Image (cartoon, rainbow, N blue to C red):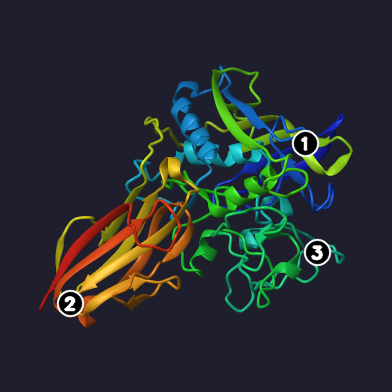
Amino acid sequence: MSGFSLAVAARSGITAILLLLPGLVQSGVFEFAGERYGVDVITHPTGYDGTGNKLIVTVGIAPSSIHADGMVVAVQNAIQTWNQLIPTLGNIVTSGNRIPADQFDFESVALHELGHCIGLSHPNLAVESGLSGNDKNYTASTKGANQVYDLNPGIDGIIGSSDDVRGDDVNLHWFPKGLNNPFLIPQTVDQFTYSRDLGDLPVVDHFAVNADRDVSHLYPIERTEAVMQQGILAGEGRRTLAADDVATLRLGMSGVDRIAGTADDYSVELHYVGFTDSADITLAFDDKVTFSACEVQADFLGENHNHLVIQTGSISFNSNFPWYFETELRTPETTPAVAIWINEQTYAQQLQQGNNVTMSITLDPRSRNGNLSDYWVKAMTPFGTFWLNEHMQFVASEVPIRAYGGPLVNISALSLFEDATGQLPPGLYSVYFAVDDNMDGIYDGTFKSSVIFTIQSS
């Protein structure tokens, strides 16, 4: 979701207007970063003063808003999502989400716009670039010395990927050094792990990657896109954050020195304050925009012109679209929920040799989000025991092999296997997915799930 960006001087501050139009995409970039205010600008939420503290940002619904009552639950859910700051995979949901196929999900759009109001911009060029069609999906940049965008999708033909050839365009997108993967997030996010400098890319990469859904297929991670990408389709839900959304906000939270763990670090907590026009961020269906838009005003942080602090934010929506308003208020749980799925089911199944079989996992870390953990996937088969390794391959071993060691993150859906069963011998198959409550390389399986299936001779 990106939008048209207009930056103008507003007395002693700065104003940006970002419109969200259906069908576009972007993230990993801060508001106001660009030619006018500088490519290194980092924008912070309301209340940051350069010292470490918890920022309380109030969020309200304008009492005069159309659909005011219907907005309440969705706004509270979106606030909770930003407060939890959980990176997820498979966050594009198009079935089983109760959203009618011809309606736009208000919660997903509000989540995107709230991101603008706490300092995040679009990771792609978007409509503010003046480009049209798919060209808007290239990673955010300035035009460089030649004053034109240099656009070439590279050999893979995927716009926004690592082999894009961008000439002298100046990158605005912060990426993990040496990885250039917006779908992963390291344990520490600061100037030592994230960069805008293309010299910190892997040697084979040409430009910074943005977390577009088409790009996600290259990793391969399906149905994943940054919330701050522009555009959403009718019937689609995108209610959880991607790693890129979380990393960008956390980079800002490392403070003025951009070093995590120092005195100028801060945290952000959004508070819903009900129907009011005086919150730090107000939302309203006021029909002032073509779809949705966030307008923010910001001031420089004292004499430091590389850091801006948002003073106020307002979000407008157009009531002339068919909107879906969520009615179920989510409540945070504590124990991580893990599941492994065979053909989209978690119960035992019987398959005939030659049938297709898909295997995927889901993980909701809940209150343990970010805790260091070991991930394990074990398959007991008629021809031995196999473990998923760090290269996403099943290898035969009687000794446990760890799939991953790192922070617990939300995995909405991650495919592990998809093929016909013709090459698998008949018999019983038991598959386990487990995460530990520590990261010591020892198979503990503190939180686990399993599923069994049998293959019969055809």
Would residue 385 be found to the left or right of residue 438 on screen? left
Residue 56 position in % (x across, y down): 63, 28
Rounded to the nearest angstrom, the CA distance separating label 3 from label 2 is: 60 Å
> SS class of the residue under badge 1?
loop
Q: Are marks 2 and 1 in contact (CB under 8 Å)?
A: no
Quarter holding residue 175: bottom right
Specify whether residue 290 is in view.
no
**Quadrant (top left, top right, bottom left, bottom right) of the C terminus:** bottom left
> SS class of the residue under badge 3?
loop
Q: Nearer the viewer, residue 83 or 403?
A: 403
Residue 204 position in % (x across, y down): 66, 78
> SS class of the residue under badge 2?
loop
Rounded to the nearest angstrom, the CA distance separating label 3 from label 1 is: 36 Å
Would residue 206 be found to the left or right of residue 421 on screen? right
Q: Amino acid at mark 2?
A: Pro
Label 3, residues with CA under 10 Å away: few <14, some 14-19, many ≥20? few
Residue that badge 2 annotates? 382
Specify whether residue 259 is in view.
yes
Can you name the residue that lies furthest to the bottom here? 423
Residue that badge 3 annotates? 148
Would residue 363 be found to the left or right of residue 136 on screen? left
Residue at point 82%, 38% (across, down): 8
Q: Nearer the viewer, residue 35 or 68?
A: 35
Above or below residue 370? Residue 277 is above
